[in-house]
Amino acid sequence: MSQQGIRVFVTGGTFDKEYDELTGRLFFKDTHLPEMLRLARCRAPLALQVLMMMDSLDMTDADRGRIVAACRDCAEGRVVVTHGTDTMVETARALLAAGVGKTVVLTGAMVPYAFGSSDGLFNLGSALSFAQVLPPGVYVAMNGRVFPGDRVRKDRERGIFEDAP
Amino acid sequence: MSQQGIRVFVTGGTFDKEYDELTGRLFFKDTHLPEMLRLARCRAPLALQVLMMMDSLDMTDADRGRIVAACRDCAEGRVVVTHGTDTMVETARALLAAGVGKTVVLTGAMVPYAFGSSDGLFNLGSALSFAQVLPPGVYVAMNGRVFPGDRVRKDRERGIFEDAP
Amino acid sequence: MSQQGIRVFVTGGTFDKEYDELTGRLFFKDTHLPEMLRLARCRAPLALQVLMMMDSLDMTDADRGRIVAACRDCAEGRVVVTHGTDTMVETARALLAAGVGKTVVLTGAMVPYAFGSSDGLFNLGSALSFAQVLPPGVYVAMNGRVFPGDRVRKDRERGIFEDAP
Amino acid sequence: MSQQGIRVFVTGGTFDKEYDELTGRLFFKDTHLPEMLRLARCRAPLALQVLMMMDSLDMTDADRGRIVAACRDCAEGRVVVTHGTDTMVETARALLAAGVGKTVVLTGAMVPYAFGSSDGLFNLGSALSFAQVLPPGVYVAMNGRVFPGDRVRKDRERGIFEDAP
């Protein structure tokens, strides 16, 4: 119910992939987050910032370091990070290790928004909601659930997130 | 983070309206919730139940009574109600007056899902998330925000929900 | 294969209906034709002109007279008219009676484009194609078929166009 | 206006590509043609047959030979071939060289149907329409236009088909 602001950091991932009709390949251009928030009629107080636009399989430690620093240094106490699903858990671990002392929720999509992704919109609504009410900590919001950042894994065979022991 | 189940009651509303290509009018057929949850890759533990399929402007006190009874009588302690936006606030008030002692989150959509509604998917993700973490009470989840059921109004001119004094 | 231009007259119809999220009703705002042609990567030489934006059930003889005059008076010898399906056949008859001496193809949609109408895009592609190759005459292009304007009827029970005796 | 049947041969191409959410790559599964024709409310008399499901860049002379044979040997005098755009012109040339003596129209899409391709539906409507009225010959129907198979090229920089000298 908090009306304090949320910072949304965009890092790319499937969420934002597009189809290049000249090459037939997927690529990144601009983020779709502003359009998604507009269509969602979202009025949660938030500030959107693009940190990077990349496939999370290509993220280096330095990239993760930038995400950690951005989460730590922003003015808001509540943060959503859009992220590729393949290494979302690694970034959650990096945020946990850094101890940013804020509510940070990572989310992503299995299907690009530009391809009619239903999970992207659903997950965005989910992540923004969890971010508004959960206590400080690092979380992954996927599949309509929320997981503590240190107890989650992606099952790549099935394409879902689940509890990790 | 609770993994206890959520009951989702469908009551109709814009969410579930369809276009009748023979008459050119909007109507209700089946709920789109199962398809929406499937496309969203939702794996939150939930049970879906259709209570009614109606425009919320047509809801009577008896209809609202059925919604209240369903929320009170179901086994789950966490409930999401999909509802037309026009009288969502009245149903929230009825639930508050009845004192169901559970976490009940009402949500809806401004645009039918069948018409490519982005807010429906977003709101569904939002409502299911708030329902999992908020303490007992009655809430409205719309526009990426959550409102206590007794301090919310719909601004019909602008088509948004906002704090009521 | 003709590369002479095509005039496209927009008259409204289901094609162009939109959902008004404030009232929950269908209404006309701007035509979607330019967006549809852009997404279709259409490069047929054409000039688009909005004649009216109305439900074809509301068309008067005067409205039909305006359509006839527009078809007759435009510079192009090939014309596509987007039109509501309910009285498309009546307008075809009016065009036939007037004897415009051009290739005029009427088309429409059963589902609004804004609601993810697949038939609108398909029918537009169909009508523009028939218009480029058929000899002078008045035609209705619907359901992937083309009908002479004087031997077609809409089966309102089934929502399809068929041969009329 | 002919009501004789049309044979539609599916060969794959961008038309039918899907997004594999487990690998993040594009792939072929089943053809979307039946769904597209259903959503288009298409009632043209046609028989659909999947010849192959492949990227046209991977087509060999043998694959093209199969397409030529299928067009020549089918019962219908009017044929539509869905095809990847990259080598559509080569297949048109192979059909011309073989002299099948029928009306054969090749078409494709720049964006996969599964990604909300508007050009796929538009082009399908266009190809089916041209196939019904053009005299025997080999044609490419793209961008809302129709080209003789021996006087067309794809401009890969711009992703459009145009007249070839």
Image: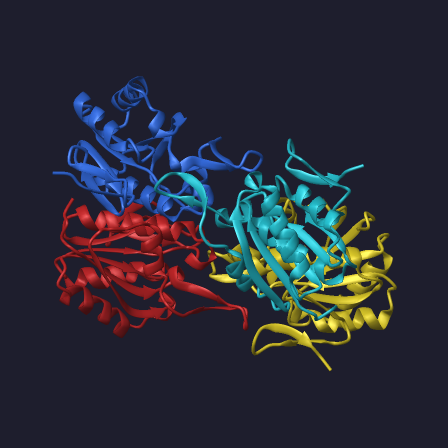
Chain colours: A blue, B red, C yellow, D cyan
Where does residue C4 sit, x and y in percent of width and height?
83, 48
Where does residue D62 sit, x and y in percent of width and height?
59, 45
Name the foreground residue: C135 vs B80: C135
Q: In which quarter of the image is residue D47?
A: bottom right
Left or right: D102 in relation to C16: right
Name the foreground residue: A97 vs D82: D82
Do we see residue C30 in this rendering?
A: no
Query: Which image quarter is the C terminus of chain D in?
Result: top right
Where does residue B136 sit, x and y in percent of width and height?
14, 52
Instruction: Count numbered badges in the picture.
Output: 0
Residue drawn at (31%, 73%), measured in percent from left and top? Answer: B60
Left or right: C30 in relation to C91: left
Residue drawn at (85%, 63%), measured in percent from left and top? Answer: C136
Name the foreground residue: B124 vs B36: B36
Do we see residue B122 in this rendering?
A: yes
Residue at the bottom extreme of this rendering: C165
Residue at the top extreme of this rendering: A62
Query: Which image quarter is the N terminus of chain D in?
Result: bottom right
Left or right: C139 in relation to C36: right
Where does residue B34 sit, x and y in percent of width and height?
32, 60
Relative to D127, say whether A78 is above or below: above
